[in-house]
Amino acid sequence: MSESLYETSSPPVVGSSSPPDNNNNDNNNNNGTTTRTTRSGTTTANLSYAQADEMVKSIDDMKTKRNFHNQFNALFRKSATYQWRQYKTNLCQIILPLILILLLFILQQIVTNFVKDQDGAKIPSILHPRAMMPPLFETNQTIVEECRAFAPAVYARSLIYIDQLNQNLTVEPMMLQLETYAGTNKSNGDTIVPLIFGQSFLGRYATYCSDTPSIAAPITMERMESYDKFTNETFDNWKTIIVNGGYRFAQVDNDSLAVSLLYNRSISFGKELGTLYTLASRSFRAITGASLTEIIFDGIKDFPTRQATLDFDLVSLLGPMLYIFIFQLMMPVVLRLILYEKENKLREIMKMMGLEMKTYWLVTYIFAYSIYFIAMMLVWALGALFRFRYFTVNSPLVIFLLIFFWGHTLVSFAFFLSTFFTKTETGTVVGYIWVFGTGILASRVIDNIFSSDSTPSSSIFVISIFPPFVLYRALFILKKYVSFDGPGVSIAKMNNPGYQFGDIYGFMIVEAVVFLILALYLEEVLPSDYGVKRHPLFFLQKSFWFKKGAKRVTPITIKPHLQSESEDVAIERQRVIHHDQLLALEVCDLGKVYPAQGGAPEKVAVKSLTLGVDQGICFGFLGPNGAGKSTTISCVSGLFPPTTGTARVFGMDIRDDIESIHMIMGVCPQDNVLWDDLTGEEHLLFYGRIKNMKGKELTDAVYNGLKQVNLHEETEKKSVEYSGGMRRRLSVAISMMGNPKIVLLDEPSTGLDPSSRKKLWDVVNGYKRNCAMLLTTHALEEAQELCDRLGIFVGGELKCIGSSSELISRFGKGYKVSLTIQGGREEDTQKFVRELLPSATLLNSLAGTYNYEVPSNSIDLASLFRQFEDNRERLGITDWGVANSTLEEVFVKVTMGVQNERGEYVIDEKSMNISHITNAY
């Protein structure tokens, strides 16, 4: 028995349902299996617990066959097709960073052309470069360790002369004012400085005193009335400026010389250190008279240069400020890719159809990274084509590794951010705000931190923990070493102090791993609109580390229902509690409460629902909107977690083994959950591959599935081009792919025309022989046609249960007799009816038409017809009719009525009108 449950069966035969049978017959076979003949004439079977164990074992076999490769292949092919159909959107996303590179190139060309147009914009040739000399210092300057001094905060924009002097002005040559301060050892400095700065020193500096200025600038003459005004205006404000350098003498005696050489690295890069050291050594030798080997190092000279055109490398200077945006532009794209499937329940429907989430995340990661990587490779290629020194001077391997590692950090960080959003548009907007916000913060604030030599390594470490800032750190270093014709960053130097790309790559790798783990963890535990979440400490459970197979659990104890319920509902509860055979579906004391929102009280959607569905049976839910029908299906399918109670599918609990249940489940949700750019055929191919179908089996199943729902001639149409009814039929076909053993159909015929609805009913009737089926509907005709058993929901509670004929017999009360009477004859006619039908009950009267309800056991139809015809003229009866009670009347009575002391539903006639009946379903 268990083997036949999972073998591939032929497609259901359309139109094979037999005439309805109002009685269900249960029989016990010798093998312990309970068989039931349904109203459609189909013989079904419940499994014994021993057979159920074999079924669970077969599910484990299905898990083995449903290997990673099959699902990866299905999802990868689906994603590739979908992304290809999205080529316009993808091209725009890839072209945007290229446009920014193009704008930077155009801006560079504008600056270059502007510089070329200036007169004398040439760098002259230098055939005999001068040596780099020690720094000059003016009086009253304080030299500190950082090589900074205080000076007037003004710049000479004009030559100022004084017409009338109020004070004597003594002018002395600057060279006579020259001094050097040596910190706390001023006496040592006073002794040694004259020996350092001798006539030879002044001679060297004379070479810089040229009568012809090397830089021409316009000078204006400004007349001032007094020296006081000159002084006040010149020294009104002070600021800290950078000076070239100096000496700090710690110790000078006959045995040793301890001197620190201070220099300004940002100006000379230490080129004058050799000269400074030579001068200090010579002076020490002169003071001590020691016979030391004389060190001759007058200075450093640059190589001769030829004339060149003056240019300004705008790209190298401003590039990082723009690249920080370019490198992050793909993050909102990845966010949108993830959130689109999350918001539209596509991820959940794939999970319900048996897709493993590890496969989903891997394929999504691959496609997200691929979009980023293609965009960045094109940016790199375009930058190299435009001869940006940023991309041509720095080592290609250094740039490639930066692009490679940053891509993993970006995608993982986007996965992490996606866990906090449920709406696609919200997440995308926040993503772009993040990109531009962090980019501006990095270029305006973080840039100063990285460029300062005084920034401690601990601060750089903390800043680098933040993904956009570790990216900017790398971009800043690449810029630093190509600016002003720098040599760039090479592989040999990438780990040297000042470069430290190994640290940067390490940060990116660690951040990528950490954010990916956090994303996967938060997806499992953070509450969201859809999906069952785990306990925050689920990773501490043994079952997380050691995967278990499907497990059939033992029967559970269902609490007695304390509130009053109808007899048939109570009997159903007892059937589920005390059943000896395994039911295909057991709903056990299920409850669902939605939390309060917006000041409204909490919503109780389902109250203590208990029912069972047998194999081969279609169970239907009826009820007004908001009664709890769709919520029940959502809880059983794993879309929503139940608040209380549970449900079991062939003995497997939805709380503990939902993954195994999804292996044998097919779901048609209330909304059409489809990819707009995929065709109907591509949808069925995808879900068939998830169910481990392949080859001819897959192609035949796809063709038959499309043909049964009349979509086989629309295989090339995208689902977005389908009508609402076509999309609905496709959703039903998807739910039946792969021979599921339990099928959940939530209002499957919504939006269908009568012809399509009839064909769909034939498909459902043909397929339900192989599975258990749970269906919700508002169409009473559909419920009678498809459902072997029905349950009517009101306010989240199951009010009655049984077959349609049982419900009509129980609540319909026999026949409906209607009479239309001429004016003035009403009293005689009512008296006639009371005498003819003493048990008749007047339901309502309107405009001369009277409707009576007559128990079936108190009426003789032949006698009734004869009496009406014989007395028609005498009583003024213009029209009359007799009809059976309908399911519609039962539905209205149950949903709008109240129970009396005998458990019967009666309707308050004062509150009931035609609109009530119309709107009830």
Image (tube, helix red, strand yellow):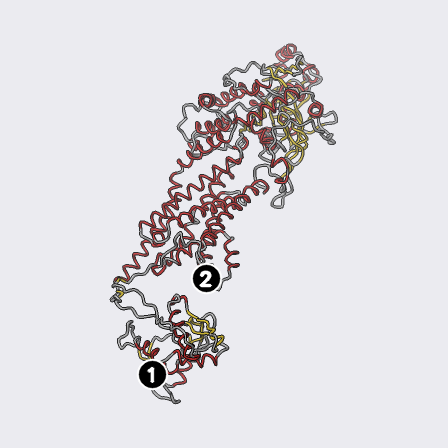
Q: Along the horizontal axis of the image, is 268 left or right of 759?
A: left
Percent position of residue 195, x then y: 40, 80
| Residue where numbered disc 1 is placed | 161
Give neighbour class at mark 1: few <14, some 14-19, many 20+ (Cα, 10 Å): some
Q: Can the viewer see residue 167?
A: yes
Secondary structure beneath dot 2 equals helix
Dot 2 and dot 1 residues touching (CB under 8 Å): no
Q: Earlier in the sequence, mark 2 or mark 1?
A: 1
- Measure the C-alpha gap from mark 2 to mark 1: 40 Å
Residue lying at 55% horizontally and 23% vertically, measured from the top left: 782
* Kind of element beneath mark 1: strand
Residue 505 got which mark? Answer: none
Relative placement, left or right, of 593 versus 265 is: right
On the image, which quarter does residue 894 sit in?
A: top right
Q: Residue at x 35, y 77 (%)?
A: 201
Q: Is residue 43 above or below residue 589?
A: above
Q: Is residue 457 left or right of residue 558?
A: left
Name the residue: 50% across, 25% down.
737
Q: Which residue is mark 2?
A: 448
Q: Residue furthest front?
A: 291
Hey, what amino acid is under mark 1?
Answer: Tyr
**Residue 83 position within the rendered picture, expressed as x and y whole percent measured from the top left:** 42, 37
Quadrant (top left, top right, bottom left, bottom right) of the N terminus? top right
Compared to 730, does 18 lie above or below?
above
> Image quarter for residue 484?
bottom left
Q: Position of residue 22 (x, y in %)?
A: 62, 15
| Image: 273 above or below 376 | below
Q: Amino acid at mark 2?
A: Asn
Between 762 and 744, the one lying in front of the other is 744
Location of the C terminus (image quadrant): top right
Which residue occupies the foreground of this view, 603 or 143? 143
Q: Marks 2 and 1: which is nearer the front?
A: 2
